[in-house]
Image (cartoon, rainbow, N blue to C red):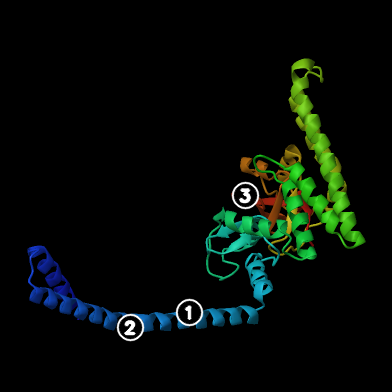
């Protein structure tokens, strides 16, 4: 039918273009052809209109079905709940704050995944072998932040998010260092959402810690200016070096009361994955490794690379020999590097 229509139209064009002096009979014939063409077009359009109507009906049915399913699954609240579930760490089941994509393609909280990989070489989700590589999940971070900022999540979840992100910002040790202003803002928001006395106390305590850190930061900034003025006044030492030593001493002042309670009085079995902290002072650590600890027959010995473990939180990989009374440790924070052996009295037990 399409070919006949095309031929009729071509014939009509040729008839008009060949001469302007067509006879009345020829005009009658062409008029007849035109009528035939119109009738033929009508026969073609009818099925098209029917098909369009059928397609429109199917679309309407699909829309009604989608709307029914949407209501059946909880509507907006149901979709939002599923989005939130997809943005929880499979390890901690907490809302993501610092999300990363692992080699298995799944998204985890960075700290939780690092801890997992300290003792395992498999995926937390699939249990298949997996390496330690991970990349920041920027899209997931943005999604969670927008849900929180727009007030789309419940108060308890929002409080937990601000508290976790505030602590993370305050304790960031990678470049460019702690974000104290951002941390203060987050903790204040968590305080506004606090429902219990313990929640309020925790938020207020963190605000005090952050304020103390801000004072310390301003003192170190002043040291930059004073450096050019004192010229070795501090007992012949470089002033900036002295200020850095003050920073180390301040850390000791803050942490020593806690570490004193965690000091290990004797060697004992510790399960794999136990967290310990190695003594801060490098010279003290060297001395402890170069002599047998109490009850041991031999020393663990010293390697220059062990210096990088001083003051670090580590994960027990296995218990050493009774003859050395030691533990094989791996640093918790990357770069983890090699595992090394340390005597029990060089360690502070953080998890029991």
Q: Residue furthest front?
A: 24
Question: Residue 228 versus residue 10: which sits nearer the camera?
Answer: 10
Question: In this view of the protein, can residue 171 be seen by the observer?
Answer: no
Residue under numbered circle 2: 46
Alpha carbon distance from label 2 to label 3: 72 Å
Q: Residue furthest right?
A: 197
Residue under numbered circle 1: 59
Q: Report the quarter where the N terminus lies.
A: bottom left
Describe the element under mark 3 as helix, strand or loop: loop
Q: In the figure, is residue 288 to the left or right of 18?
A: right
Position of residue 203 measured from the top left corner of the image (x, y, whole percent):
85, 53
Q: Residues within 10 Å of mark 3 (few under 14, many from 20)?
A: few
Residue under numbered circle 3: 334
Question: Residue 250 versus residue 197: which sits nearer the camera?
Answer: 197
Q: In the figure, is residue 194 to the left or right of 186?
A: right
Q: Nearer the viewer, mark 2 or mark 3?
A: 2
Question: In this view of the protein, can residue 275 be seen by the observer?
Answer: yes
Alpha carbon distance from label 2 to label 1: 20 Å
Vertical side of 133 occupied by 39: above or below: below
Position of residue 107 measured from the top left corner of the image (x, y, whole percent):
59, 62
Quarter of the rendering containing residue 144: bottom right
Q: Residues within 10 Å of mark 1 (few under 14, many from 20)?
A: few
Describe the element under mark 2 as helix, strand or loop: helix
Describe the element under mark 1 as helix, strand or loop: helix
């Amino acid at each position: 039918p399409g070919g006949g229509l095309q031929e009729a139209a071509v014939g009509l064009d040729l008839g008009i273009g060949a001469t302007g002096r067509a006879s009345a009979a020829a005009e009658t014939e062409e008029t007849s052809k035109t009528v035939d063409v119109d009738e033929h077009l009508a026969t073609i359009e009818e099925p098209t209109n029917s098909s369009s109507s059928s397609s429109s009906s199917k679309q309407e049915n699909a829309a009604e079905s989608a709307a029914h399913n949407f209501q059946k699954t909880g509507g907006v609240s149901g979709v939002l709940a599923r989005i939130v579930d997809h943005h929880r760490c499979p390890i901690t089941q907490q809302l993501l704050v610092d999300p990363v994509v692992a080699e298995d393609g799944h998204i985890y909280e960075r700290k939780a995944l690092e801890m997992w990989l300290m003792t395992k070489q498999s995926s937390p989700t699939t249990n298949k072998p997996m390496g330690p590589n991970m990349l920041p999940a920027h899209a997931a971070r943005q999604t969670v932040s927008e849900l929180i900022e727009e007030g789309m999540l419940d108060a308890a979840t929002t409080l937990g998010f601000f508290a976790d992100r505030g602590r993370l910002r305050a304790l960031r040790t990678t470049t460019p260092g702690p974000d104290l202003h951002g941390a203060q803002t987050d903790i204040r928001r968590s305080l506004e959402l606090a429902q219990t006395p313990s929640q309020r106390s925790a938020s207020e305590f963190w605000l005090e810690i952050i304020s103390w850190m801000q004072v310390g930061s301003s003192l170190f900034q002043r040291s930059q200016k004073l450096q050019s003025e004192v010229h070795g006044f501090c007992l012949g030492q470089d002033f900036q070096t002295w200020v850095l030593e003050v920073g180390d001493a301040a850390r000791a002042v803050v942490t020593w009361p806690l570490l004193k309670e965690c000091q290990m009085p004797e060697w004992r079995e510790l399960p794999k994955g136990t967290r310990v902290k190695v003594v801060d002072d490098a010279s003290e650590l060297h001395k402890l490794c170069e002599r047998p600890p109490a009850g041991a027959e031999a020393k663990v010995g010293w390697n220059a690379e062990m210096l990088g473990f001083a003051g670090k939180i580590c994960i027990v990989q296995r218990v050493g020999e009774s003859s050395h009374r030691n533990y094989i440790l791996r640093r918790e924070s990357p770069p983890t590097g090699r595992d090394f052996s340390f005597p029990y009295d060089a360690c502070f037990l953080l998890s029991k």
